[in-house]
Image (tube, rainbow, N blue to C red):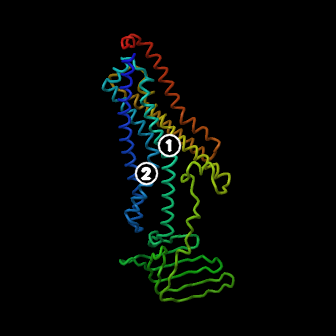
């Protein structure tokens, strides 16, 4: 029995080491591919809006945790499917089964792999993801309110805040804007429209100002119906007085930590509170899916006799089962958004494939030991 125990310990380490290396490689490769594709959307901030490459890289880095949360369970599934299919193809799994190793024993390193993925996903869900989302949204908010010149598109109206809309015709080689229109609604009773032939943006002392040349300022009094026009050679408008205060932005559910979701400090309505509770539960159900994704390939590959012609049908069965599981998980998440009472279903969907797969492995393991008693006795 001591020899068999040492054999199983070494076998578990061997399988876990291979599965872990494949999972990390697949997760890294898939994350990099998705990250590069999504980062291209941020290139517009550099090409058309004049932001620095360092800020682009920082923004791109902040969106990476959201892809890791999606890709990591898939990486665990692919790792287990690949490793056990290779073990079967190279007849290593046949030797293990002939030595009396049960399917449940083979599942032990896979469960350890799932536990590692679960721990990584919990760190992502509870800290890294909300922290990255909050920093990303805060930075975009700052870009919108402070770097006004980078947000303006030629030939289109840009709403900077509820009080300010700016239109520019085009830009020249010196960075000046040609053809400028500003609609200023700070005073609802006396809205102001400013027209200028040329203008330039200047950031001084943390404030953004527009310096306009050769234009006029039109103010309309809605109470009296009078229009006053002021012609100017040079006019300066401070945008810092118009932008929304940073503390006025309310963090979304994806930006909040678990304590903020369960015990929000500010007064919120019942619908928002339910949305926070749904998000809080997703912080746990997403990591739990790692166990189901990891164990599904074993339930499809291990039962039955070894087929020398390959296991294509079983591999396709595992992929199909994973697709059904993922589809059910997405359906339940959509249902939760409309009916928060459906939250318990997310735990059921997350753990049901895991429980069914363990049941299949346990049942097949009993049948396997009954069919091959002589091999087990020989090993002892």
Q: Is residue 6 left or right of residue 235?
A: left
Q: Quadrant of the C terminus?
A: top left
Secondary structure at badge 1 equals helix
Residue furthest to the front: 2
- Residue 21 % position (x, y): 35, 37
Q: Residue at x 48, y 73 (%)?
A: 206
Would you call the spot at circle 2 few (<14 residues within 10 Å), some (14-19), or many (20 or more)? many
Q: Residue at x 42, y 64 (%)?
A: 45
Task: Work out whether 61 lies above or below 229.
Answer: above
| Viewer-proximal residue among 332 and 6 | 6
User: First in sequence: mark 2 or mark 1?
Assistant: 2
Q: Residue at x 37, y 63 (%)?
A: 53
Residue furthest to the left: 90
- Residue 262 % position (x, y): 62, 48
Q: Quadrant of the N terminus?
A: top left
User: Which residue in the protein does label 1 denote?
Assistant: 122
- Residue 201 % position (x, y): 45, 77
- Residue 141 % position (x, y): 51, 64
Secondary structure at badge 2 equals helix
User: Which residue in the protein does label 2 denote?
Assistant: 64
| Viewer-proximal residue among 222 and 122 | 122
| Viewer-proximal residue among 16 and 303 | 16
């Amino acid at each position: 029995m001591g020899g068999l125990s040492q054999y199983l310990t070494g076998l578990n380490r061997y399988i876990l080491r291979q599965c872990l290396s494949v999972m990390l490689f697949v997760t890294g490769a898939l994350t990099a591919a998705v990250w590069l594709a999504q980062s291209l959307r941020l290139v517009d901030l550099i090409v058309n809006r004049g932001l620095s490459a360092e800020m682009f890289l920082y923004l791109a880095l902040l969106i990476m945790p959201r892809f890791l949360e999606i890709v990591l369970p898939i990486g665990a599934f692919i790792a287990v499917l690949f490793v056990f299919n290779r073990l079967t193809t190279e007849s290593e799994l046949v030797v293990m089964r002939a030595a009396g190793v049960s399917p449940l024993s083979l599942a032990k390193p896979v469960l350890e792999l799932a536990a590692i993925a679960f721990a990584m996903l919990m760190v992502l869900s509870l800290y890294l993801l909300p922290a990255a989302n909050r920093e990303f949204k805060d930075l975009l908010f700052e870009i919108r309110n402070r770097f006004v010149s980078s947000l303006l598109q030629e030939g289109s109206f840009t709403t900077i805040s509820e009080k300010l809309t700016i239109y520019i015709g085009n830009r020249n080689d010196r960075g000046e804007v040609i053809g400028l229109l500003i609609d200023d609604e700070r005073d609802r009773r006396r809205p102001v429209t400013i027209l200028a032939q040329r203008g330039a943006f200047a950031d001084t002392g943390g404030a953004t100002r527009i310096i306009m040349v050769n234009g006029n300022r039109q103010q309309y009094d809605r109470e009296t119906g009078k229009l006053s026009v002021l012609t100017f050679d040079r006019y300066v408008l401070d945008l810092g007085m118009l932008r929304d205060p940073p503390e006025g932005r309310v963090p979304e559910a994806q930006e909040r930590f678990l304590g903020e979701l369960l015990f929000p400090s500010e007064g919120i309505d019942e619908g928002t509170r339910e949305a926070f509770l749904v998000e809080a539960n997703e912080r746990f159900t997403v990591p739990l899916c790692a166990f189901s994704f990891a164990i599904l390939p074993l339930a499809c590959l291990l039962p039955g006799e070894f087929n020398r012609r390959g296991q294509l049908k079983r591999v396709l069965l595992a992929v199909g089962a994973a697709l059904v599981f993922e589809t059910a998980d997405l359906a339940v998440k959509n249902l939760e958004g409309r009916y928060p009472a459906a939250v318990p279903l997310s735990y059921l969907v997350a753990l049901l494939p895991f429980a069914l797969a363990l049941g299949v492995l346990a049942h097949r393991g009993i049948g396997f030991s009954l069919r091959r008693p002589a091999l087990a006795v020989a090993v002892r």
